Amino acid sequence: MHKIKVEDREFEIFLENETINKRIRLLGIQINVDYEQKCPLFIGVLNGSFLFMADLIKEIDVPCEVAFMRVASYEGTSSSGKVKELIGLPDDIEGRDIIIVEDIVDTGLTLTHILKTIKEKNPSSIKVSSLLLKPAALKYEIEELEYIGFEIPNEFVVGYGLDYNGLGRNLTDIYRATES
Ligand code: 5GP
């Protein structure tokens, strides 16, 4: 089994780049069909989504636009109750078909907040594409979750944009933390 170390933690191979890319090709086909005659605005949630966005967008052949935003959490409160602020959200959302691009949905708290804020700006439609989803961790019902790459167990993963303490985003494959 192919194992690596990121900082102090050991990880084992979970999804190889070829597997990820094959899945992204299928997501692209699905989006091309669903958005025929439309011009979706893809909004990536930084930092984790940058590689997924880059590969996904290469599969899109309808006219489209790409933007990125980030979510900042205010310090000083308990993690689940943190106030989140959206930074860099494009201001031309009204009347647009929005596709939010996420690296991973865990509890769904971040995404729920993003969706609420974007909906207030009156988009024509809004859907979410997340490379990874941990169904067992999900605490919020998110009906906009339409284009999922992989449903994974409730384990910590790193690579392909996802970090561990800021490291590991450059790994081309996705790894999961080993049991130690
Ligand atoms: P949620 O708000 O859905 O609980 O958390 C979403 C965020 O938590 C993701 O955007 C990501 O930054 C982080 N996260 C959740 N699970 C993982 C994981 O397994 N690996 C990494 N690297 N980040 C994760």
Image: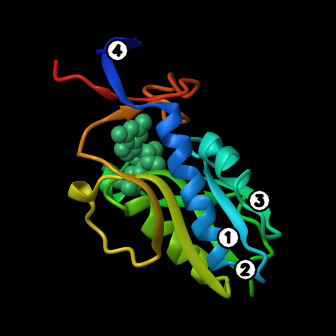
Residue 90 vs 180, above or below: the answer is below
Which residue in the protein does label 1 denote?
A: 32
Answer whether labels 2 and 1 touch (C-beta < 8 Å).
Answer: yes
The tag earlier along the polypeptide, 4 or 3, is 4
The tag earlier along the polypeptide, 2 or 4, is 4
Local secondary structure at mark 3: strand
Residue ranking furthest to the left:
180
Of the pair 129 and 156, the residue shown nearer to us: 129
> Is residue 21 something one can see in this rendering?
yes
Does residue 123 appear left or right of residue 92 in this picture? Answer: left
Which residue in the protein does label 2 denote?
A: 36
> Ligand 1 near label 1 (Cβ, under 8 Å)?
no
In this rendering, which labeled residue sits more in front, label 2 or label 3?
Answer: 2
- Marks 2/1: CA distance? 6 Å
Of the pair 95 and 160, the residue shown nearer to us: 160
Task: Report the number of numbered marks.
Answer: 4
Which residue in the protein does label 3 denote?
A: 66
Q: What residue appears at the point 64 percent right and 43 percent down from the top-left corner?
A: 50
Of the pair 12 and 166, the residue shown nearer to us: 12
Label 3, residues with CA under 10 Å away: few <14, some 14-19, many ≥20? some
Quadrant for the C terminus in the image = top left
Residue 177 x %, y %:
28, 26
Residue 148 vs 167, above or below: the answer is below
Answer whether labels 4 and 3 touch (C-beta < 8 Å).
Answer: no
Which residue in the protein does label 4 denote?
A: 2
- Marks 3/1: CA distance? 15 Å
The tag earlier along the polypeptide, 1 or 4, is 4
Q: Which amino acid does label 4 sit on?
A: His
